[in-house]
Amino acid sequence: MHSVFSTEIIVRPDDIDMNNHVHFSKYLDYFLAARYDQMGRCYNLSMEKFIEMGFNWVASKMSINYKRALLLGDVAVVKTQLDSFNGAQVKVNFWIYNKITQKLIADGYGNFTLLNISNLRPTRIPQEIIDNYSL
């Protein structure tokens, strides 16, 4: 079982849609922003370090289940947890909560594929990266 890490994100005015709640596409932005933050802060292996090593991650599948709305000024707590590694891919689960109510707002997962920057082709995730992420 992998560790769960959290990132807080404040809902901004440009996140709000015409129904006065967070636009559905922003939940994916929150998930990706949390992953970016946690890669460096929690795993000490930032996107910049991956690029220095000649790698990059691309999203290959996203699944989001919407439960409740977030509103302007709310604070989203985005929790993520690595689920599994498979060849060139990693599956990451996520949960988005309202910080004040502690209610689940959305959940889902993303599959990410590791690319070799030199040829832009998928590459098997090196064991040392898997070991680093196995917290």
Image (cartoon, rainbow, N blue to C red):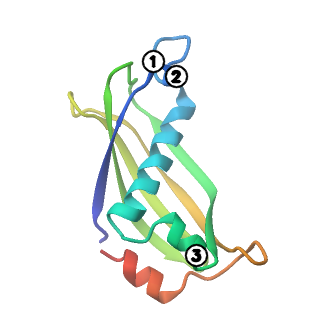
64 over 38 or under it: above or below? above
Q: Nearer the viewer, residue 97 or 41?
A: 41
* Residue named by callout 1: 21
Work out whether mark 1 precedes mark 3 in sequence or the reverse, and give the earlier one.
1
Q: Quadrant of the N terminus?
A: bottom left
How busy is the neighbourhood of tag 1: few (under 14 within 10 Å), some, or many (20 plus)?
Answer: some
The residue that appears at 62% across and 74% down in the rendered structure is: 55
Mark 1 and mark 3 residues within 8 Å of each other at the beta carbon: no
First in sequence: mark 2 vs mark 3: 2
The residue identified by callout 3 is 52
Q: Nearer the viewer, mark 2 or mark 3?
A: 3
The quadrant of the rendering that contains the C terminus is: bottom left
Please identify the quarter of the rendering in which residue 131 is found: bottom left
Q: In this figure, which residue is indicated by the disc labeled 2?
A: 14
Q: With 41 as the anchor, is 99 left or right in this view?
A: left
Is 97 in front, or is 29?
29
Residue type, numbered disc 1: His
Residue 89 as seen in the image, left or right of residue 78? right
| Marks 1, 3: nearer the viewer | 3
Locate residue 71: give its quadrant.
top left
- In the picture shown, does residue 134 fall above or below 59? below
